Image (cartoon, grey):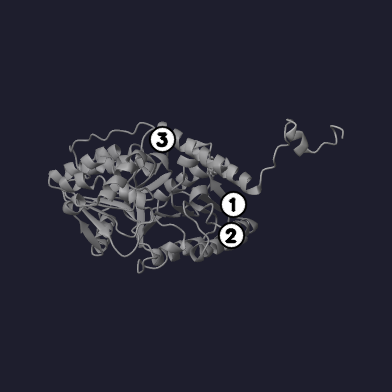
Amino acid sequence: MSAAAESPERRSRRGGAPRPRKRTRAEIVALVVGSVVAGMTISLGLALLRQPTPPRWSLPHVFGVADPTFVPSALAGSLMTAGNRIDVLENGVRIFPAMLAAIAGARRSVDFEAYIFWSGRVGGEFRNAFIERARHGVPVRILVDALGSGKRLSGSDVDAMRAAGCRVVFFHGLKPWDRGSLDHRTHRRVLVVDGETGFTGGVGFADEWMGDADAKDHWRDTQVRIEGPAVEDLQGAFQENWTEATGETLAGADFFPAPAAAGTARAAIVASSSRYSTADVERVYAVALSAAEKSVDVANSYFLPNDDEVRLMTSAARRGVPVRVLVPGKVNDVPATKTAGRADFGRLLAGGVRIWEYEGTMFHPKLMVVDGRLSTIGSANFDARSFHLNEEINLVSDDPRLAAELEASFERDLSRARPYTLAQWKSRSLAQRISEWALQPFKSQL
């Protein structure tokens, strides 16, 4: 038999090189998945190593929130405008009808930005509202986060909106080798209609936010509707992210009409981004805590204060200011954040801060009220990710009427919450203590 006619098996037995074995489909899938996981692990490692040095908030108590120096100290360039109307909307049963009605009345533009926009009943209602306006010739721009919405917003919904003329854009695609794609998310909640009516807050556009916090799967949340000059800055925040994602600049009266007074409230829109060297939303919290003289009420769904923020809260409590914190209880969609945050409950409770845990459903508002005057509400969680990594947006106001309304809301929520005591914290299990310790290196990513 000639060498050319020999079988591979015979050549192998004679010492020749065997023909390479073809990989199976399962092996190829495993190789691809392994490569993706390795890439994401490397990217996360680089993200942890390259975190910017956070600002230090060593702020003494030298003025109050009513002092003329408070606004420039806390807002650092953000404009506080007069003549605004701000309406508080609680839970999906009130939030979604108000937003859908605003969209239905749009004449010139609809600009929408969200972290969570998922297919389902709620998502379908917004999809249909966007499509209806687009078919009537109103430009509709929809900017959603690729991580928060990418897998839960169906391709058929995206195709239907695009076919009707809506511009649907995903913010920062998921690239395992790109640190920014993992870290830099838009967590903002923005709806601006005709440049005149705006909404922001904590709500997600998904079925979890249906109802009136009346069932375990109907989350508790708060949104605000804004009319007046502050809407211009809300539109500007949307423009910032839209331009980054598309290269398109929004200009003209369809987006920025001449501001007109709609109420009596003073308000500012404070936007935070990892592109900035300072943490604008965190500064508002820090300066307000240092200025507090009568009361501090914090309601936040993901509460992970750093050492400076713990000191600011306990310092306020020790100078006689009642400091109350309301967080989720057993119903929690991200248990790791609750676990990591609980590690600091001991210092807070020992320092005089009082903590409550909401019962019955997931608690998702993100707000603070200080001295019955200063209030802030928006998308920012009380954690390093919101303060330093995400795109966030908060409304800040020194309107006593708005503060009173949010305080009343806080009191209603307390009636559905249980106190968390220092004795409970000290008696937590060994497993809880170990999990808290294990998560501390990752607090900047939670």
Q: Which residue is mark 3?
A: 48
Q: Which residue is mark 1?
A: 167
Number of numbered labels in the structure image: 3
Residue 317, relative to residue 326: is it above or below? above
Residue in the image at 85% along x and 36% along y: 5
Label 2 sits on what residue type? Asp
Q: Residues within 10 Å of mark 2 (few under 14, many from 20)?
A: some
Does 440 sit left or right of 112 as displayed?
left
- Earlier residue among tags 1 and 2: 2
Secondary structure type for disc 1: strand
Give the image location of residue 102, x and y in percent: 47, 61
**In the orientation shown, which residue stands out farthest toward the right?**
2
Quadrant of the rendered image containing residue 245: top right
The residue that appears at 50% across and 58% down in the rendered structure is 118
Distance in Å between CA atoms under marks 3 and 2? 36 Å
Can see residue 105? Answer: no
User: Where does the N terminus fall, quadrant-wise?
Assistant: top right
Task: Specify the label residue 157 is tagged with.
Answer: 2
Do the CB atoms of the residues marked 3 and 1 lie less than 8 Å apart?
A: no
- Label 3 element class: helix
Circle 3: residue type: Leu
Q: In front: 101, or 379?
A: 379
**In the drawing, does residue 263 fall left or right of residue 132?**
left
Residue 393 visible (yes or no) = yes
Q: Residues within 10 Å of mark 3 (few under 14, many from 20)?
A: some
Q: Residue 130 bears which disc, if any?
A: none
